[in-house]
Image: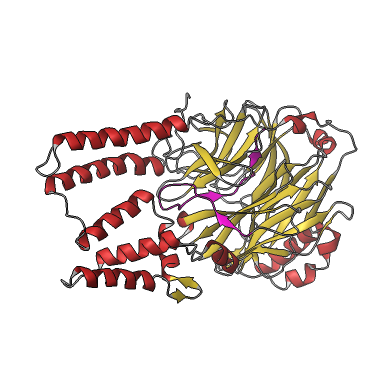
């Protein structure tokens, strides 16, 4: 390395100085220790302390909006808070992040709340915001309620960034959102969909995915005050996304991924044995996957419950399945919702109206039941297109609350967010 | 100090570098740089022009800011452009890093530029 103007010695000294700067920085910031997963409480719960319990109701109440990508968390008082996005269509500028609270005593969902809009996000982040997307809500061990949600400044979902806001009063008031720095490449194309897990030191482990050019899954480490402190890669390439991570003990966890490739159409699985620092190469497992989201939780007998569209094409059936920790043995528990047509073929509006009316009455719960007539007169393009009317049950999100109840929320025909809850006693009856 | 000082500085320096100088002297060029910095504050629909640019680039890396400042200093006549072989060396180094880092960012391997992890065993 020499030039006429910059001599050999100065060039060498510059290179050595630069190397010294990087070496010193590396030395002063050694590899961060990763705390184990915080899993003790969920496995300590009794298997069946009460009688069988299974209940469904709608969490959302708006009749006009396209609703999708729901998420739920339990609160210390036994209640729940759910969030989802709602707008004229997916990706529209009018999409808002909405939520509702579940009163454990009344066993019903309250009125919808608007938690974030395109305008509020733009004002807070000082960035142009085109649209909002998937929200995820979770209560941290320090009782800070976190809301992560996707926003896009340019292009489609591949241009996404993740915004984070928190509440220290269980959702009464919220901080202003701020964008997480998740990648050096223009900080674009990181999306969130699945439930975070927590580590023993309070670190938030947020499963995320990337959609620009490739499709792959990552695991973000976020400090209790919301700073991204590191990440690991669960998969690479262009055929997997939306990881659902289930800790099995302090060091081990399973990640199941939505398959977005064109060859086998199966759920992918990956494992970590070091609290998320490294992940095994994803491999296809038994259940089919039509490029749709899935969600999983651990059961007290060290197995997993998984909600998914166990189909090679379409999302017309949402099934609950049980598997062991090896992911080798799979057993259907119940079809949570399904089209009456086993192939998922569309129906004429007249037939569809009759079927979906019955399904509404079975699903809505008492408080939302009064909406059925207005709903049936308003069957629009969310469910009926030129080829006919479809049933779609998708984007499940699964948690197990501290009282041992399982809570599942998912998109019910793009028109409502449906909440299903059950306990271990009911689960034992099904197996 | 405005909240988005980095975005304003990036906007001003980038605009200064990419717009023609029309052969004016150093004083006029300095005035042009200040004018462009001022333009970065013009609001459109509630956001400044610098904020709009930041919407697409996010906060640029410090290395990018240093590079912009260097080329701005060259245009102002405060620094001389390095000889061609030094520029080629720098270009090769940057291209090498780009070839290494951006595929890593784009998920072609299990290595991420943010946090190095051991490749999977399986």
Residue drawn at (51%, 54%) of the image: A161
Residue lying at the far top of the rendered structure: B121
Residue A356 shown left or right of residue A314 in the figure: right
What stretch of residues is rendered in magenta? Answer: A176-200
Q: How many marks?
A: 0
Q: Is residue A146 left or right of residue A429?
A: left
Is any atom of residue A336 visible in this view? yes
Of helix, strand and loop, which mostly describes the magenta segment?
Answer: loop
Whether residue A363 appears in this view of the structure is no
Residue A403: x percent and y percent? Answer: 83, 40
Q: Position of residue A149 (x, y in %)?
A: 59, 55
User: Compared to A345, does A406 lie above or below?
Assistant: above
Residue A190 lies in the magenta-colored region: yes
As drawn, the residue found furthest toward the left would be A4
Eyeballing the image, is B88 above or below A377? above
Which residue: 68% across, 44% down? A319
């Amino acid at each position: 390395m020499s030039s006429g103007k910059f001599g050999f010695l100065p060039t060498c000294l510059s290179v050595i100085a630069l190397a010294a700067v990087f070496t010193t920085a590396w030395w002063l910031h050694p590899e961060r220790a990763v705390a184990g997963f915080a899993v003790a409480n969920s496995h300590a719960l009794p298997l069946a302390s009460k009688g069988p319990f299974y209940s469904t109701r709608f969490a959302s109440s708006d009749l006009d909006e396209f609703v999708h990508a729901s998420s739920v968390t339990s609160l210390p008082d036994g209640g729940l808070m759910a969030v989802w996005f709602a707008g004229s269509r997916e990706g529209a500028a009018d999409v808002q992040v909405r939520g509702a609270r579940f009163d454990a005593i009344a066993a019903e969902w309250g009125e919808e709340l608007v938690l974030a809009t395109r305008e509020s996000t733009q004002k807070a982040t000082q960035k142009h915001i085109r649209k909002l997307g998937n929200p995820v809500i979770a209560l941290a061990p320090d009782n800070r309620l976190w809301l992560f949600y996707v926003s896009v400044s340019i292009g489609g979902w591949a241009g996404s960034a993740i915004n984070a806001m928190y509440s220290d009063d269980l959702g009464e008031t919220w901080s202003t959102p701020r964008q997480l720095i998740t990648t050096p490449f223009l900080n674009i194309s990181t999306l969130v969909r699945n439930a975070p897990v927590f580590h023993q030191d309070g670190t938030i482990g947020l499963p995320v995915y990337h959609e620009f050019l490739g499709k792959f899954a990552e695991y973000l480490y976020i400090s209790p005050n919301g700073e991204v402190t590191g990440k690991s890669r669960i998969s690479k390439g262009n055929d997997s996304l939306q990881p659902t991570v289930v800790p099995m003990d302090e060091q081990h966890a399973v990640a199941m991924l939505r398959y977005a490739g064109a060859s086998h159409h199966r759920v992918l699985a990956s494992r970590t044995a070091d609290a998320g620092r490294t992940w095994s190469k994803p491999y296809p497992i038994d259940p089919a996957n039509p490029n749709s989201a899935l969600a999983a939780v651990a059961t007290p007998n060290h197995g997993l419950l998984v909600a998914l569209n166990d189909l090679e094409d379409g999302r017309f059936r949402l099934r609950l399945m049980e598997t062991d920790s090896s992911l080798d043995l799979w057993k259907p528990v119940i079809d949570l919702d399904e089209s009456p047509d086993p192939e998922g073929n569309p129906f004429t509006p007249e037939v569809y109206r009759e079927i979906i009316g019955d399904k509404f009455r079975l699903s809505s719960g008492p408080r939302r039941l009064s909406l059925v007539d207005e709903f049936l007169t308003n069957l629009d393009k969310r469910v009926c297109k030129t080829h006919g009317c479809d049933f779609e049950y998708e984007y499940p999100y699964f948690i197990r609350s501290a009282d041992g109840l399982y809570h599942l929320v998912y998109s019910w025909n793009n028109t409502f967010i449906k909440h299903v809850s059950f306990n271990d006693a009911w689960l034992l009856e099904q197996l | 100090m405005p909240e988005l000082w980095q975005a304003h500085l990036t906007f001003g320096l980038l605009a200064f570098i990419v717009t023609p100088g029309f052969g004016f002297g150093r004083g006029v060029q300095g005035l042009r740089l200040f004018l462009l910095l001022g333009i970065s504050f013009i609001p459109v629909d509630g956001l400044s022009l610098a904020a709009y640019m930041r919407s697409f680039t996010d906060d640029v890396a410090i290395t990018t800011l240093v590079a912009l400042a260097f080329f701005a200093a060259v245009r102002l006549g405060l620094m001389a452009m390095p000889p061609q072989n030094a520029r080629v060396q720098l270009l090769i180094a940057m291209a090498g890093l780009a070839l290494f880092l951006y595929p890593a960012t784009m998920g072609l391997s299990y290595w991420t530029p943010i946090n190095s992890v051991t490749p999977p065993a399986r």
